[in-house]
Amino acid sequence: MNMPLFCKVAGDTTIPAEVDVAIIGGGIIGASAALELAERGLRVALCEKGEIGGEQSSRNWGWVRRMGRDVAEVPLAMQSRMLWREMRQRVGADVGYTESGILYVASNAREMAGHEAWYEKTRHFGMEPRLLSAAEVAVMAPGAGRKFVGGLYTSGDGRAEPGVATAAIAEAARARGAVILTQCAVRGVETKAGAVSGVVTERGVIQCGAVLLASGAWTRLFAGNLGINFKQLHVRATVARIEHSGPAPEFAIGGTDFAFRRRQDGGYSVAVRNSNVVPLTIDNFKLMFDFLPNLRHSWRELQIRFGAHFFQNLQIPRHWGMDETTPFERTRINGDAPYGTLDTQALHNLIRAYPAFTGAKITRSWSGVIDVTPNALPVISPAPLQGLFIASGFSGHGFGIGPAAGRLAAELITGQATSTDAAPFRYAA
């Protein structure tokens, strides 16, 4: 079965002359913020250079989890879970959300110690994760092809469908008055008296008092043209969809080198867990010392590649004028071809872990660009320009916490008291 990665949203044909907030980027963060702001009665224009949800927002695993997150991110994940629970009623569409549970299985004592340490650090949040023994894992997920020494299970975590969720949220924002502009790249931000006064799009100027930059992997490039050094690098992750008719648990499972979750369309999304490709660019060298502390802990999960991409990236303009064609107009949507053989490796690893998947067939494979920050936490914060806000750098965690991240961004833009602590996500130069 071959199906589109995302549901296409028809863009509005006319750009507004003036709004309260212009949002740059139509992924799940931008769409969620647009919905939050529109529900508060603000005039919103959501500007997307390509298609709504066309990049990483539709290419991720679809997990909605609190388990395993950085402690600073847990409150945001907890709030997001509550928002996902009401999402179908809120947007008037099925986004595939279900609390089917997520199980992390540990192949050795070091992995199990990591789960135990996370469990101890987060017990005060009052969630429901459980540490499992090897025997309990075997009962929950029988038929393993390798020995697991234990696991961590959270029954209230689950999944949603990336291919439909962002589109549904954007349509709900439009139903509440937001303008949705696709194939409409923002070239730059206009200022007056040192503050944001509007955005210049390829289709004209939109006057506004606030701008939210939620452009995912493109944020560093856009911010750089404004003189803002947003510290962000890219990794590429590959996912495959498989058809499988045999027995399999309803909950998602992640192990050392495999991950899978059931899909609403009857298949499964599978990936090589803890294996992301880093195509080297000049930014990797510019930001080397910022990322070095985290790299010391995560280097085993990365495959660093030097090749043609390095030289192609060098040709991308870093500065441009408001009347010039921008890199965002030259590349509307990042390519989605799987990287190397990671799709077949994902299925191979899954079959080794759970032989019941023997005979499963890959029906589609794709990859996406994940935007990563030095501490692997997103930036949801005012930027060093009055009226400009950033919500980016979600480091592969954005889909699950997207609704709460959009709410936090909206609260910051409107000056409301934030419903979760914004301090861990503050912009740092």
Image (tube, grey):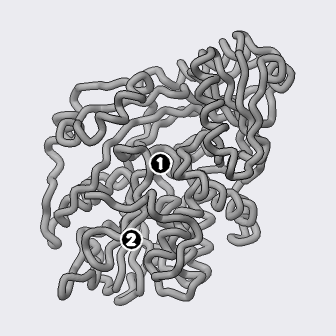
Determine the residue located farthest toward the right in the rendered image.
139
Of tags 2 and 1, which is closer to the observer? 2
Dot 1 surroundings within 10 Å: few (below 14), some, or many (20 or more)? many
Residue 73's disc is none
Asked if disc 2 and disc 1 are in contact, CB closer than 8 Å, the reply is no
Vertical side of 29 occupied by 249: above or below: above
Q: Residue at x 70, y 65 (%)?
A: 87
Q: Can residue 144 be seen in the rendering of this structure? A: yes
Q: Residue 94: name its quadrant.
A: bottom right
Q: Secondary structure at mark 1?
A: helix
Vertical side of 190 occupied by 88: above or below: above
Q: Position of residue 197 (x, y in %)?
A: 27, 85
- Going by the image, does 168 lie left or right of 345? right
Quarter of the N terminus within the rendering: top right
Q: Position of residue 32 (x, y in %)?
A: 55, 67
Identified by mark 1, the residue type is: Gln
Residue 56's disc is 1
Q: Residue 255: name its quadrant.
A: top right
Q: Residue at x 40, y 87 (%)?
A: 19
Q: Secondary structure at mark 2?
A: strand
Q: Nearer the viewer, residue 60 or 9?
A: 60
CA–CA distance in space, label 2 to label 1: 18 Å
Dot 2 surroundings within 10 Å: few (below 14), some, or many (20 or more)? many
Q: Which residue is mark 2?
A: 212
Q: Position of residue 22 (x, y in %)?
A: 39, 77
> How many numbered dots are placed on residues in this image?
2
Q: Nearer the viewer, residue 292 or 55?
A: 292
- Going by the image, does 303 lie left or right of 59? left
